[in-house]
Amino acid sequence: MKDICQAVYEKLCSDLNISRYVCGRIYPIVLPEDAPLPAIVYTPVLANYDSALQGDTGFVRQTMQLVCHDTTYKKARELSRKVKCVFQDYSGDMCGLNIQAVFIKSDYEYNGNTALKFDTNEYMSSIEFEFHFNEK
């Protein structure tokens, strides 16, 4: 059985618009320190599993956050629009996982400044998708 995180990673890598732009810089959970930009970080946020009287049905609603990092607000936003085109309203075989539906849950922008890091050369655009699929 294919993992949803692996399927999302492979789908992003297989899209020419994405792979050419980020040059393979697609990371799970956290952007490595001093990683060149642009880059994409994907994170599983929440999984909801459906149950029936006799147990788990195998149906999953997985929320995934994809954060696009780039050197300007405009570039980060443009990269997030490319990611949106890959997953919005997708259904079908995604790298061995049968995706029944994909929905956008949220879409927002923020810059990279935190209490510990002040960097005006990094901007982030985040999209959360909900993937519907059957694990069994």
Image (tube, grey):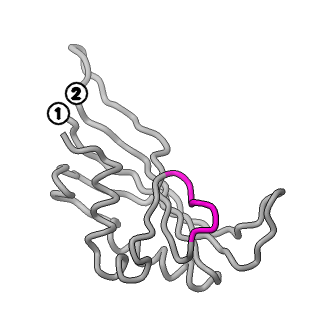
* Amino acid type at image mark 2: Thr
The region drawn magenta spans 29-35
> Which quadrant is home to the N terminus?
top left
Residue 78 placement, left or right of 11: right
In the rendered image, residue 16, in percent from the top left (x then y), is placed at: 29, 80
**Where does label 1 land, which residue?**
136
Under tag 1, what secondary structure? loop
Measure the C-alpha gap from mark 1 to mark 2: 8 Å
Viewer-closest of 80 and 89? 80
Discs 1, 2 touching: Cβ within 8 Å: yes
Q: Tell me the residue at 64%/83% (across/down).
A: 72
**Secondary structure beneath label 2:** strand
Label 2 belongs to which residue? 57
Q: Is residue 34 magenta?
A: yes
Residue at point 71%, 79% (across, down): 121
Which one is in front in this view, the residue at disc 1 or the one at disc 2?
1
Q: Which quarter of the rendering shows the C terminus?
A: top left
Image quadrant assignment for residue 129: bottom left
Q: Name the residue rendered at 37%, 77% in the picture.
A: 18
